[in-house]
Image (cartoon, helix red, strand yellow):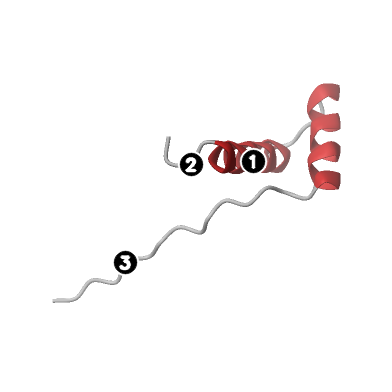
Amino acid sequence: MQRSVTVPARLRPAPAAEVAAALGRFHDGTAERADLRLLTKHYLAVLEERAPGR
């Protein structure tokens, strides 16, 4: 029996303008769930670029 295995998409840093806007809302206290998700994925991608495999 063959199982279909999906591979998660590689994380990619978000565009600078989107990160800046989301950070602004975060610092203002008006960030929404989508902003937090964008920032989390962005910084995980940056971390992976700087320290791959760690």
Residue that numbered label 2 is attached to = 52
**Cα distance in 3D space between marks 3 and 1:** 25 Å
Q: Viewed as shown, does residue 33 lie left or right of 54? A: right
Q: Is mark 1 on a helix, strand or loop?
A: helix
The answer to which quarter of the image holds residue 2 is bottom left
**Mark 3: few, some, or many residues within 10 Å (few <14, many ≥20)?**
few
Earlier in the chain: of badge 1 and badge 2, it is 1
Q: Is mark 2 on a helix, strand or loop?
A: loop
Q: Residue 16 at x, y = what percent?
A: 82, 45
Name the amino acid type tagged 3: Val
Name the amino acid type tagged 2: Pro
Residue that numbered label 3 is attached to = 5
Q: Viewed as shown, does residue 45 lie left or right of 16? A: left
**Cα distance in 3D space between marks 3 and 2:** 23 Å
Residue 45, numbered label: none
Q: Residue 1 at x, y = what percent?
A: 13, 76
Task: Give the camera-side residue of 5 and 53.
Answer: 53
Earlier in the chain: of badge 3 and badge 1, it is 3
Report if the CB atoms under discs 1 and 2 are less than 8 Å apart: no
**Cα distance in 3D space between marks 1 and 2:** 21 Å
**Mark 1: few, some, or many residues within 10 Å (few <14, many ≥20)?**
few
Vertical relation: 37 (above or below) 5: above
Earlier in the chain: of badge 3 and badge 2, it is 3
Look at 38% across and 65% down and name the residue there: 6
